[in-house]
Image: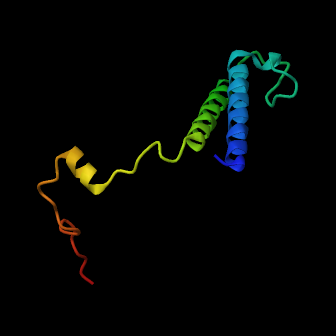
């Protein structure tokens, strides 16, 4: 892993954790109890910002998934070859020529 990709992974993990933490705060705290620097803080509201909380949690999870995908070594998931795909699906005996099932459009 290069220094640039390592830096990207660190940034993605930090942003993911912060987004999840903000999502949990939005989901758990009433609007009047939110910190003053949070968007949506309103002293007169008793309700919760559940939509913002769920969006924060989902966005944080997506950022963490992207960080994991970025951090994995290049050879972890080998490419599937045509032979392996045919063997896995059982279609190795009956090979269909390319384009055999397609209708040609008349011009």
Q: How is the protein colored in the picture?
A: rainbow
Q: Position of residue 6 (x, y in %)?
A: 69, 43
**Count of numbered circles in the view:** 0
Note whether 49 is above or below 107 in the view shown: above
Q: Depth check: give the residue in front, 67 or 74.
A: 74
Note whether 91 is above or below 57 in the view shown: below
Instruction: Name the residue at the bottom extreme.
Output: 107
Q: Position of residue 92 (x, y in %)?
A: 16, 53
The quadrant in which residue 67 appears is top right
Instruction: Name the residue at the left extreme.
Output: 93
Q: Residue at x 81, y 20 (%)?
A: 34
- Looking at the image, residue 64 sits to the left or right of residue 36; the answer is left
- Looking at the image, residue 35 sits to the left or right of residue 15; the answer is right
Q: Depth check: give the residue in front, 83 or 50.
A: 83
Q: Position of residue 3 (x, y in %)?
A: 72, 47
Q: Residue at x 83, y 23 (%)?
A: 42
Q: Residue at x 71, y 37 (%)?
A: 10
Q: Position of residue 13 (x, y in %)?
A: 68, 34
Image quadrant for the C terminus?
A: bottom left
Note whether 38 is above or below 67 in the view shown: above
The quadrant in which residue 52 appears is top right
Q: Depth check: give the residue in front, 26 or 6.
A: 6
């Amino acid at each position: 892993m290069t220094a640039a990709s390592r830096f990207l992974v660190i940034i993605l993990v930090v942003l993911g954790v912060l987004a999840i933490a903000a999502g949990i705060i939005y989901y758990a705290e009433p609007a009047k109890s939110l910190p003053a620097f949070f968007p949506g803080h309103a002293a007169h509201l008793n309700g919760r910002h559940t939509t913002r909380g769920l969006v924060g949690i989902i966005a944080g999870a997506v950022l963490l998934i992207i960080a994991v995908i970025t951090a994995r070594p290049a050879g972890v998931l080998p490419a599937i070859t045509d032979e392996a795909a045919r063997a896995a699906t059982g279609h190795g005996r009956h090979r269909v020529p390319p384009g055999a099932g397609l209708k040609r459009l008349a011009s």
